[in-house]
Amino acid sequence: MLSKAIIKLVSSLEQKKYRLENNLFVAEGNKIVEEIIKTNFPIKFLITTSEWLSKNSLNKNIEIYEVEESEIKKISFQKTPQSVIAVCNIIENKLDISEIEQNLTLALDNVQDPGNVGTIIRIADWFGIKNILASYSTADIYNPKVIQATMGAFARMKVHYVLLPELLRKLKNDNNLIIYGTTLNGNNIYEQKLESKGIIVMGSEGNGISKPVLEILSEQLLIPNFSNNLQKSESLNVATATAIACSEFRRQQNY
Amino acid sequence: MLSKAIIKLVSSLEQKKYRLENNLFVAEGNKIVEEIIKTNFPIKFLITTSEWLSKNSLNKNIEIYEVEESEIKKISFQKTPQSVIAVCNIIENKLDISEIEQNLTLALDNVQDPGNVGTIIRIADWFGIKNILASYSTADIYNPKVIQATMGAFARMKVHYVLLPELLRKLKNDNNLIIYGTTLNGNNIYEQKLESKGIIVMGSEGNGISKPVLEILSEQLLIPNFSNNLQKSESLNVATATAIACSEFRRQQNY
């Protein structure tokens, strides 16, 4: 049986305020917890069943609360709870400018939907991106919906919440990085020469890239619409656009 | 005030059984209803507020139930209801083999998550794909979660539920179409010559392309993982993979 204190703590972590207060967040499910263990991400404790424990080897001194499935259902944030919940330590990622200088980095300008932010982290991880710069208005990476949508990729990604226009201006002026942004008025992404270093800015779901950031962009990139339907759609989902942009950057660098 | 019969009807349409029985489905929200109206998709009736009606011009004889916001909240399937709900007629799309023969078409082999199916329809629409072939085990396009995720693109897409292996075999043998599939053992998609006609098969979230379909593929395509992290992720979300594949097919045909 879980103590009332533990139940209260876990429940509170759905809210950012309590995540910051406790420096903890929640990650759930077999696949995600496996990824966390694989990457040695710091786990404060696990809540799981005897069955899960019998199938998974934990080689570290992880504190474990062994409970019945029914107890997990009660505290889970998910609609279809699985049999393991990890409560993890929030880790502070240091912004290493030399790493940003030498690699491709994503920047999220007010991407508010947690599912989109999580999906973008998973995409960035697939494409070998190590750092994501996020405006303070972007959804919190430790939001349970973000964590779940990353499918564990959050454990490999350094996400930095920053004053985005200020940092981008600095990276452009002091570090000579190209600041790319995907917009509806840009140059066709398939026809542009894309560099192996630089920042790719993705804007918010409703409004795209904000004006202060737009002014800093070195180059605007357009993902062309191939529909010849007169009533064609006007926008791509931001995570979809991120996938297409990352794919094209990596293709040009490697093939 | 909505009658009990209307409330009961709308509520029932969350379930496939009642959608088929009534030949109706539900689409919600400003953006999606605007797209439906724009594309002249058949609407049975609208449930909306006087405010919404004052802002939108409806040039057809659409039956309208004018209600208070609070009534919409009661019957909405959405967490954050907007001020318009459309109840639409299910339309039967005829499978036009000559159209399939001359274009790029997507095939979904047991893609079960409604959000993924909806996102894929939106992506396909963006990339000018007109038809989607779906195995019967793929999520129902008229599921409210699919409809919402398409952001209205469902109104421009012909989705056909079919015996997928049988149809693919026929398209390969009788119509000389190349059947592409994205797998983890394929040839690098960026290095393959991709044709402007053919079928791109996407597999299920957990298991990829099913064995019967795998055996029919003319060519397996791999979206390479660019991460050099030892604990890199093993899979892309199926909608993300669809976006990358469609982007690369269209790029090769046009640039």
Image (cartoon, coloured by chain):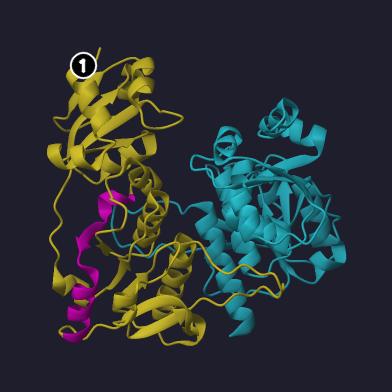
Chain colours: A yellow, B cyan
User: In screen coordinates, is B230 left or right of A239?
Assistant: left
Q: Is residue A172 magenta?
A: yes
> Residue placed at 31% from the left, 65% from the top?
A129
Picture quadrant where residue A233 is located: bottom right
Q: Nearer the viewer, residue A83 or B60?
A: B60
Q: Nearer the viewer, residue B8 or A30?
A: B8
Residue A43 versus residue B251 in the image, above or below? above
**Residue A167 % position (x, y):** 19, 73
Q: Nearer the viewer, residue B16 or B101?
A: B16
**Residue A201 % position (x, y):** 35, 72
**Residue B144 % position (x, y):** 63, 42
Instruction: Mark yes or no: residue A79 visible.
Output: yes
* Element marked by disc 1: helix
Residue B146 versus residue B1 in the image, above or below? below
The N terminus of chain B lies in which quarter of the figure?
top right
Instruction: Mark yes or no: residue B120 visible.
Output: no
The C terminus of chain B lies in which quarter of the figure?
bottom right
Q: Could you tell me the amino acid type at mark 1? A: Lys
> Residue placed at 71% from the left, 34% from the top?
B16
Name the residue beneath numbered marker 1: A4
Circle 1 crowding by C-alpha within 10 Å: few under 14, some 14–19, many from 20: few
User: In screen coordinates, is A87 left or right of B254?
Assistant: left
Picture quadrant where residue A105 is located: bottom left
Residue range highlighted in magenta: A153-173
Q: Is residue A189 magenta?
A: no
Most common secondary structure along the magenta stretch: helix
Picture quadrant where residue A13 is located: top left
